[in-house]
Amino acid sequence: MSNARRIARLFKPYRGRLFVVLALIALSAIISLISPFLLRRILDDAIPQQNKAELTLLVAGMIAVSITTGALGVAQTWLSNVVGQRVMHDLRSAVYRHLQRLSLAFFTRTRTGEVQSRIANDIGGVQNVVTSTATSIVSNVTTVFAVIIAMFALDWQLAAFSLALLPFFVWLTRRVGQERKRITTARQSRLADMSSLVEESLSVSGILLGKTMGRGEELATRFTDESRELADLEVRSRMAGRWRMASVQMSFAVMPALVYWFAGQTSAISIGTVVAFTTLQTRLLFPIQSLLSVGVDVQTSGALFARIFEYLDLPVEVNEGDTELHDVRGAVRFENVTFGYDPDGPPTLADVDIDVPAGAYVAIVGETGSGKTTLGYLVSRLYDAQAGRVTIDGVDVRDLTFGSLTPRLTGDLPLPRVDP
């Protein structure tokens, strides 16, 4: 499934509220188009004919349009932010819950700072896109289409002249977005490295190791280098395509002047039409400029969503069974159990058979790395045996629910203690 479809699925539970948001956006866009036509009537009819009653009515209409669109905008912004924050909550919860289901093996081979960075930096980085960008896109697209229709309704020649450069602007913006997406991927990876370094070096154990081994200066130099690279990436991200976007903004600024020039070539276009048209043109240029910028943000956020979905796609290696264990006696048995932390390396445990009767205490003696702690891991299903099976009261632990393996929470009798 593509990332775009997965992102769309995040909004599915809130489609009712999204429909209301879209309705408010469409209504606001339609109402806002009334003002230019009222302005044309003022300039072509009411003022030249000194019709004060009509002038008052038209001005009152323009004021009413402004108040109505402002109120609709507030309502739409509030509702879209509510939906966006709910989606952010669902995304954070989904990632956290999925991480909770992963085996201990994932956390032993993954830096703690990396996990924290995915939750804090990556999910935080898409917040603006989720909470406001989606509705901003819809709002701006609706406004653009409505304004284009109104522009052709005013004068098709001026409309065709004004819209000639739009395809070039769209192509230019896509190029900028692709460049920022590549930079964002590198930047988020660097953020994860910094988070991991801080987590490892500024914890109690990290400080003890740094001070006793004389690594303080080395760690400080490493952090400085990481920070410098992150700062360089941030500058590159913000400056990517800046000259291209500046050219677009400059073109938008000179378009009204060109419209005046074009209208001056013919006497068939009234002053009211030209002023109303440039008013509409201004309302068109700002949404288009916003869409171009949003397009860059959306492409940039694609790198963040890819990193988030990468965690959500991690396979769950230890799946919960469906058997509840009642009246626990506490008999534990290892039957020909083989297990290794590295699938390609020698096993930590090989063909182990241990029978621990209910209520018994068994001492496991061995040197460091011989697998004493691993036995406890397999009983509690932090890992699963690669061969053989571990049973509690004759039931394979892989068939048990996780609740059955936590007697302190279920109120059952404690399992036999395996002491080193």
Image (spheres, helix red, strand yellow):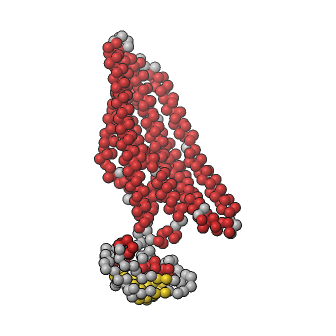
Visible residue check, residue 387: no
Residue 286: x, y in percent?
45, 34
Residue placed at 52% from the left, 70% from the top?
109
Q: Residue at 58% across / 58% down in the picture?
A: 194
- Using the rendered view, name the quadrant where residue 380 is placed: bottom left
Please state, as top left, top right, bottom left or bottom right, where the N terminus lies in the image.
Answer: bottom left
Q: Is residue 348 above or below residue 195?
A: below
Residue at image location 31% in from the left, 78% down from the top: 326
Q: Is 418 drawn above or below residue 15 in the view shown?
A: below
Residue name at image x 59 percent, y 60 percent: 198
Residue 338 in the image: state x and y as whole percent: 45, 84
Residue that protrudes farthest toward the top in the picture: 50
The reply to whether residue 187 is in sight is: yes
Q: Position of residue 280 (x, y in %)?
A: 41, 28
Left or right, residue 54 beside residue 109? left
Q: Is residue 45 above or below residue 112?
A: above
Residue 125 is situated, as x and y percent measured from the top left of the image, at 49, 51
Q: How many callouts does the rendering have?
A: 0
